[in-house]
C-alpha cells in the first residue's frame, strides 16, 4: 500500500541553523504515528512541514519533498489552502476562538464558502460528535463561548474545528501536554476512534502515551530520524543504541 504521506530527504533551515537533516519517512494511512525525541530535536518542525505551516516563518527554507498521496505538496501550483484543508493541525495549547462553540466549529466551512444554515448545523453536529464533545455541549452549543470550556473540552473543540473541513490527515503537536490525566485519557481514546477515518501524526514527549496510542514511532535526535518502525518494536527491541538510551531515560 502506498503511504499517505512520505518525506524524501527533507531538510529544513531557520536562517543558517539546520533543524532537520535528510529525513525520509513513510506514514501509513489510518494509522497513528508518534514522533518522539528530546526538546529541540526537530519533531515539531517536521510536523509543520507536513502541511506547509513553516512557510509563515521568515528566513526559513526547505529542501527535499513532502508527498501527499504521491504528489509533492510544495510543487509550483499546489494550493496551500487546499493542502491545509487536507492536512489539519491541532496545537499544543487549545486555541478556541472567542466565539460560540457552534461558531468555532463552522469557522473553516464558512471560510470555504459554505453558508447554508442547515448544512452548517449538520457539519457542526457531526464534527462535535466525532470529537466526542456533542453530549457535553449540545444544550447550549450556540450560546456558550468556546473559551469557557475546560481545557480538555477546548482541545476536543479544536479537534472538531479541524474535522469540520473534512481533512484526510490530522497533525497533533503535543495535544495533551496542557491537560490533566483524565482529559488526556479522553483525547487518547478519541485518537483511537479517529484513526478509523483519518491518518494521525502526533508529536509527544510522553513515552507512555506514544507506547499506548501509536502504531508506528519515529525517534528524532538533533534533526535526524534515528529510528522508525512499529511502536512495539521501537519500545521493546530498538535497533539503535541511542533509541534505547532515550526510551530508558538515560538522556532527554
Image: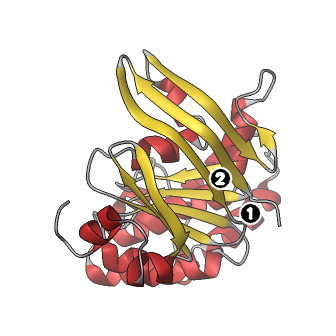
Crowd band around label 1 with a 10 angstrom C-alpha radius: few (<14), some (14–19), many (20+) = many
Q: Report the side of 140 relative to 249 (left or right).
A: right
Q: Position of residue 69 (x, y in %)?
A: 81, 51
Residue 186 sits above or below residue 174 on the image: below
Q: Position of residue 138 (x, y in %)?
A: 57, 77
Q: Position of residue 186 (x, y in %)?
A: 43, 82
In the picture of the structure, the residue carrying the numbered disc 2 is 106
The residue under the point 37% across, 63% down is: 204
Residue 84 sits above or below residue 64 on the image: below
The residue under the point 42% across, 46% down is: 224
First of labels 2, 1 by sequence position: 2
Secondary element under disc 1, as helix, strand or loop, is helix
Residue closest to the eye, 246 or 96: 246
In the picture of the structure, the residue carrying the numbered disc 1 is 123
Residue closest to the eye, 146 or 10: 10
Q: How many numbered circles does the render carry?
A: 2
Q: Is residue 113 visible?
A: no
- Image quadrant holding the N terminus, namely bottom right
The residue under the point 38% across, 56% down is: 94
Are the residues at dot 2 and dot 1 in contact (C-beta closer than 8 Å)? yes
Q: Report the side of 163 relative to 133 (left or right).
A: right
Amino acid at each position: 500500500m502506498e503511504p499517505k504521506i512520505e518525506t524524501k530527504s527533507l531538510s529544513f533551515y531557520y536562517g543558517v541553523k539546520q533543524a532537520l537533516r535528510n529525513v525520509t519517512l513513510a506514514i501509513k494511512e489510518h494509522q497513528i504515528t508518534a514522533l518522539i525525541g528530546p526538546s529541540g530535536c526537530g519533531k515539531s518542525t517536521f510536523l509543520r512541514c507536513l502541511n506547509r505551516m513553516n512557510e509563515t516563518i521568515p528566513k526559513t527554507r526547505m529542501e527535499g519533498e513532502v508527498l501527499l498521496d504521491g504528489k509533492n505538496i510544495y510543487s509550483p501550483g499546489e494550493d496551500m489552502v487546499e493542502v491545509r484543508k487536507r492536512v489539519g493541525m491541532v496545537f499544543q495549547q487549545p486555541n478556541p476562538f472567542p466565539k460560540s462553540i457552534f461558531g468555532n466549529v463552522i469557522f473553516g466551512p464558512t471560510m470555504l464558502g459554505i453558508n447554508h444554515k442547515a448544512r452548517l448545523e449538520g457539519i457542526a453536529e457531526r464534527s462535535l460528535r466525532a470529537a466526542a464533545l456533542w453530549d457535553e455541549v449540545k444544550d447550549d452549543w450556540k450560546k456558550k463561548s468556546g473559551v469557557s470550556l475546560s481545557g480538555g473540552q477546548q482541545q476536543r473543540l479544536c479537534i472538531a474545528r479541524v474535522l469540520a473541513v473534512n481533512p484526510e490527515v490530522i497533525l497533533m503537536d503535543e495535544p495533551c501536554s496542557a491537560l490533566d490525566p483524565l482529559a488526556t485519557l479522553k483525547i487518547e481514546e478519541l485518537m483511537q476512534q479517529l484513526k478509523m477515518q483519518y491518518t494521525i501524526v502526533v508529536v509527544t514527549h510522553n513515552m507512555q502515551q506514544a507506547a499506548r496510542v501509536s502504531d508506528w514511532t519515529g525517534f528524532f535526535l538533533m534533526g535526524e530520524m534515528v529510528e522508525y518502525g512499529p511502536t512495539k518494536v521501537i519500545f521493546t527491541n530498538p535497533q539503535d543504541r541511542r533509541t534505547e538510551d532515550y526510551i530508558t531515560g538515560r538522556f532527554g
